Amino acid sequence: MKNKDDRTIPGYVVDVLFLEEMTQIQIRYIRGILEILASYMLLTTEMLYELYERNYGEKLHLQFLKKAVQTTLVIEYHYDLGQKSECKTYFYALNGPGYHALDRDNIQYRKYRFMSAYEEKSQIITANRYFIDNKYVPDIKFPIPLSKNLKFFYALNSEKQRIVAYLPALVSQAAVEEYFAKSDIKESLDNITYEQITTELIPFGFYTKATHPKDVLV
């Protein structure tokens, strides 16, 4: 029996949403949001806005981001350390229906573990900040999957050279190379540049929770 508060929607409802219910301008902007999150997995509001303008040459309007959350294509997390504060930091990630929409257009994406908690999410956000600052893009076609603990990440620089960026407080280059050596991938990994992620770790928050779609105003 489904919970009466079940937020998921089946695939055919996503199809109807895009084909019949959304306006064309909504589709245009929401498609861009989904494409960005497909590569970066998890972003702050500021990062998402920055990447949208960089990738598409125009500003992202809040109403379209909120529409993506309201329709459960995207998850919105509100930062909360369990303290009485006025912190208004938000994070965004793909939700199940968002993955379905990407599958329908054969767009590749990278996912973090279903039960990843604040440590892994903090590491993703920090790596993304480093990539954005250096104008790198995530390499979702890298032949070796990311490790479950997400202590290193893959990117491409402006010359399409592969970068393996790691968090030096959590893992060493030698450990990353050992992880690669244990893989069954036969593709050459000789032309890789290893870089330390020097960005200060961005907290995700012990008590951060998702915004309920019903509470989102468009």
Image: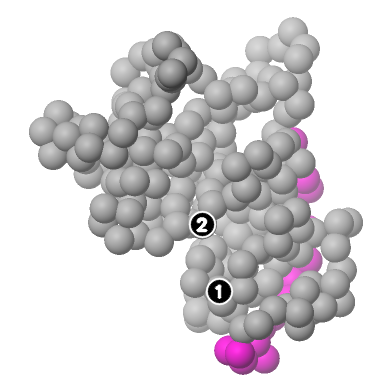
Distance from Cα at disc 2 to Cα at disc 1: 11 Å
Q: Are circles 2 and 1 on residues that touch, CB within 8 Å?
A: no
| Quarter where residue 43 is shown | top right
Vertical placement of residue 32 versus 44, above or below: below
Q: Which mark is residue 28?
A: none
Disc 2 residue type (three-letter): Arg
Residue 192 lies in the magenta stretch? yes
Vertical placement of residue 119 versus 23, above or below: below
Using residue 170 as the reference point, say whether residue 197 is left or right of it. left
Residue 49 lies in the magenta stretch? no
Residue underneath mark 1 = 142
Using residue 94 as the reference point, say whether residue 154 is left or right of it. right
Vertical placement of residue 39 versus 88, above or below: below
**Which residues make up the magenta segment?**
186-203
Q: Main secondary structure of the magenta part?
A: loop
**Circle 2 — which element?**
loop
Q: Which mark is residue 110?
A: 2
Using residue 93 as the reference point, say whether residue 97 is left or right of it. left
Circle 2 Cα neighbour tier, 10 Å, few/some/many (<14 / 14–19 / ≥20): some
